[in-house]
Image (cartoon, helix red, strand yellow):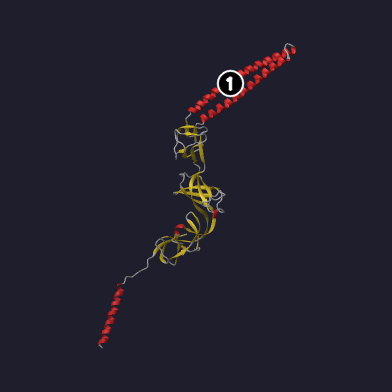
Amino acid sequence: MKKRLTLLMMCVVMIAMSACAKAQEPDIQEKTRAVQVEAVKNTKNPVALSYVGTVDSKDIVDYSFKSGGKIARMYVEEGDRVSKGELLAQLDTQDINFQLSAAAANMNSVQENIKKAKDQLEYSEQQLEKMDSLQKSGGISKDQLDQVRLQRDIARASYNQANSQYESARADYSYKQTLLEESSIYAKQDGIVADIAFEEGERVGASASIVTLRSMNQIVNIGLAQGDLNDVKVGLAAMVDVDGKKASGIVESIDEVPDMATRTYKAQIRVSDGKYRLGMIAKVSIDVGEKQGVWVPMHSIFSDGENYVYIVDNDRAFKRTVQMMENHEDRVMVSGVDSGELLAVSGMKNLNDGSKVNIVEQGE
């Protein structure tokens, strides 16, 4: 009997202790996350291809002197912005001035020869006219007349030769004068000094490149993938973005032959209103048309070995794997999400698959 009472008391104590333990356990409640959602729709959106390129100039112009000589002065440095008509460099003109003076003296000397030859020709023609009358009247023989005619012909040849020499001398003087005028180099358009090949005091040869200017007409060079050639055409609109500074552009040219190293086709995007520094890295977005599909905000997509979004259903958020297909600005066309489903677009940072959520705002 005592054994039974002891067992009964032990059972009562154990039940009491179990009840106390349960009373002390905290009441654990599932945490609810606040999210904003938007209803997924099947819509038509523009499609853009994204590339990364470098800013360059459309035109590169080399400036040189027509004659060789010593550089007297360089007026610009690499990186300088210059305006059309601005003086870039100048030769020492001492040699050219000497050559011009010599050419002028030669031209004056030839002019004197022309005057003498002309006087001699006029005298010979007058003599021939007189001798011709005498020969007709029998005053002189025909041989004497022929001698006078020969003198006239020699005088005419001398006069023609003097004129020819004058034309050569005048051409030489004009050339030397041009050399003097072109001993200074002026910018033919606005641009940026990309390279200076010589310094002041150095001697340069004729036609040697002295200054290289890049024009202010800017382009962005990109490399098109082979798969995009059917979509990207000359004339398509593009958007250029350099460190957040955007400018509109247009596809101006596409090479017919790929670059052998990258196997991409070089394309030039002409920038209409951008003022970027040469060599800057630019993001380029090219509009290639429109496509129908499910477009979601780019920020709603997570990438962690796979691309996924959170779909909200019955107050819970479920992880859904998606495949990105096209993009335009801040939206991406995806597969794996159906029209009408609720997509989490804000507050997803702390979500897990199956998290309980509270919708605080629903967009269109």
Question: What residue occupies the far left of the structure in this picture?
Answer: 2
Side (left or right) of 123 relative to 297: right
Q: Percent position (x, y) of residue 224?
A: 53, 52
Residue at image point 60% right, 24% down = 165
Query: Residue drawn at (56%, 27%), measured in percent from left and top?
Result: 172
Q: Amino acid at mark 1?
A: Gln
Left or right: 30, with 240 as reference point: left
Q: Is residue 188 visible?
A: no
Between residue 154 and residue 325, name the one nearer to us.
154
Looking at the picture, tell me which residue is in the foreground, 165 or 49. Answer: 165
Q: Residues within 10 Å of mark 1 (few under 14, many from 20)?
A: some
Q: Residue 268: where, in percent of width, then height?
A: 52, 47
Kindly identify which residue carries mark 1.
111
Query: Where residue 116 sits: x, y (%)?
Result: 60, 18
Query: Which quarter of the figure is the N terminus placed in?
Result: bottom left
Q: Residue furthest top?
A: 139
> Would residue 16 appear left or right of 234 to someone viewing this image?
left
Q: Residue furthest bottom?
A: 1
Q: How many marks?
A: 1
Residue at 55%, 27% in the rendered image: 174
Q: Is residue 322 above or below residue 183?
A: below
